[in-house]
Image (tube, helix red, strand yellow):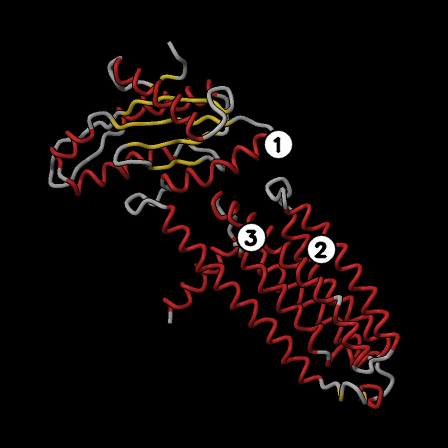
Amino acid sequence: MRGSIQGIKDLVARLLARPDEIMLSLGAGGELLVARLRALLSLLILAMPLIAALGGAKSSEVLIGLGLAVFVNLMAQIWLALARRPLRYGWLPYATGSYDITMTSVVLVLLALGDPVAATNSIVVWCFYLIAIAMTALRNDGRLTLYVTALALGQYAMLVAAIFSLAPAQESLVSIDYGTAALSTQVERLILVLMMGVLTSAIVYRMQRLVEMSGNDGLTGLPNRAWLLQGMPRMFETIRNDGGSLTLALLDLDRFKRINDEIGPRNGDRALRHFVAAVNEILLEKERLVRIGGQEFVVLMHCPIGSAWERLDRLRRSMGDRPFLPESGRDPHVITFSGGLAAYPQDGGDVSALLGSADRRLQVAKRDGRNRVVARDA
């Protein structure tokens, strides 16, 4: 029981956490897909008033439906245009999610003005709450799913409360076309909305876990090369749009293979985690340590190259004061590293160019005796 509760807490914590760069990048692509689906569904919505007219619906309802269908199609094209540059508009998924839910509520309110029971018993319109929640799974952001679910629950609950509290008599909650409005049915609908939110949240969580497993190093838990290649374009876009500095540092542990042979693979793994812990202590918020090889790491630092060099060189000098202690009473080992730095965009405009510049300087550090950090070409 305790394990189940802890698992639920972990799930909620992960859903509320800000997605990493890969998830945000995938979510940006998902937002564009949602915009295209919204545009397609909006075209289909145009047919609904016509079908309703053929079915003998009231002319007022048909006109309302037609006007809204035109408005929805216009907005769908606007959202689609914005979604073509999703990395620029971080607020876009929340805006479109709010729009999808609110437009559903607006249609129900307009139906309620003509027939209160139409708002509570309409199946077609109400189902768009569920569709809007389901589409949040394509954005890969648990926070968005929880937000859209809460918004749907709140808006529909307020609508139902208003209809039942403002009804002058029980007879006004009976309709020839839509039947009788029952409070129990509305509670069931709210439960269904909540269930859809929970199901979609579970899907998002599962997708996040799968991406995390594919983009993380199993030994250290750090992002891996795949994460680096997929996440860096979004970082570049952020720097171009919002300004700031980005320095890539390529670090290589000095003679680690020999150390690993001396202390054994198990202690070698512990030594790697010892080094990772030391580097993580100097990183600021949103800075990343990435493992790209057996003893090679990339550090992404949001500061000018000079500041990055000072921080890493201070770490390099401090490593002598915190030697790694192997098991079984073996002698302590001082873990040293060599590093090469490259600044974006001065030393390269993409991942490959930055890694090339950083590796060139790393080779200089190794050639000059190791245990040093190089930030400039000779």
Query: Of the residues shown, which amino acid type is indicated by label 2?
Result: Ala
Query: Of the residues shown, which amino acid type is indicated by label 3?
Result: Gly
Q: Classify the position of the C terminus by image quarter.
A: top left
The correct choice, above or below, for 58 with respect to 194 in the image is below
Tag count: 3
**Picture disc at residue 76:** 2
> In which quadrant of the rendered view does residue 327 lie?
top left
Q: Residue at x 38, y 42 (%)?
A: 226
Image coords of residue 192 (percent x, y): 59, 75
Inter-mark Cα distance, 3 to 1? 23 Å
Say whether residue 56 is left or right of residue 94. right
Residue labelled with disc 1? 242
Query: Of the residues shown, which amino acid type is indicated by label 1?
Result: Asp
Say whether residue 376 is left or right of residue 244. left
Q: Residue furthest top?
A: 378
Disc nearer the start of the sequence (2/3)? 3
Disc nearer the start of the sequence (3/1)? 3
Q: Residues within 10 Å of mark 3 (few under 14, many from 20)?
A: many
Q: Residues within 10 Å of mark 1 (few under 14, many from 20)?
A: few
Image coords of residue 214 (percent x, y): 37, 49
Foreground of the two, 21 or 18: 21
The answer to whether residue 164 of the structure is visible from this angle is no
The correct choice, above or below, for 285 with respect to 367 in the image is below
Q: Are marks 2 and 3 in contact (CB under 8 Å)?
A: no
The correct choice, above or below, for 215 with respect to 8 in the image is above
Q: Are marks 3 and 1 in contact (CB under 8 Å)?
A: no
Say whether residue 67 is left or right of residue 186. right
Labels 1, 2: front one: 2
Residue labelled with disc 3? 30
The correct choice, above or below, for 352 with respect to 360 in the image is below
**Picture disc at residue 145:** none
